[in-house]
Amino acid sequence: MTAEQRRQAAAVLDDLTTVLALGRVRLPTLEVDWETGHMTCEYLLRLTARPLDLLRIVDLLRKGLRYERLTHDD
């Protein structure tokens, strides 16, 4: 377990929370599982969500993938 891993987990949590808020998604629980991270050195994000929230996230991901396909040449 390193300080860098902890910083990365916290940064990802912050980024994800920000992006979801921009997409008008508020999850009941979105947090880093610090306890498991201390034991395994693998920091996981734990979330709980209502099905409607997950449908909104899936919709946002589909739109983002569609946009990416339209704007990037492979």
Image (tube, helix red, strand yellow):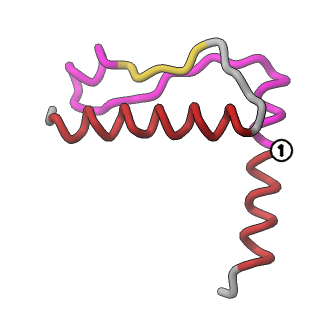
Point out the image quarter for the C terminus. bottom right
Q: Quadrant of the N terminus?
A: top left
Q: Identify residue type, mark 1.
A: Asp
Where in the figure is residue 61, as x and y percent of width and height? 74, 50
Quarter of the image for residue 32 reads top left
* Residue displayed at 16% across by 35% down: 3
- Percent position of residue 6, x then y: 26, 32
In the image, residue 31 above or below residue 6? above
Asked if 36 appears above or below 25 in the picture, the reply is: above
Q: Residue at x 23, y 26 (%)?
A: 40
- Front residue (pair 13, 69): 13
Residue at the (82%, 35%) spot, across then down: 56
Relative to 3, residue 61 above or below: below
- Expressed as whole percent of the image width and height from the top left, the position of residue 2 reads 14, 36
For label 1, the crowd category at 10 Å Cα-Cα, with few meaning under 14, some 14 to 19 and many 20 or more, is few
Range covered by the magenta-colored residues: 34-58
- SS of the residue at dot 1? helix
Q: Is residue 63 left or right of residue 27?
A: right
Q: Is residue 59 magenta?
A: no
**Does residue 20 appear left or right of residue 39 in this picture?**
right
Q: Is residue 20 above or below residue 70?
A: above
Residue at label 1?
Answer: 59
Question: Where on the picture, by quarter, is residue 57?
Answer: top right
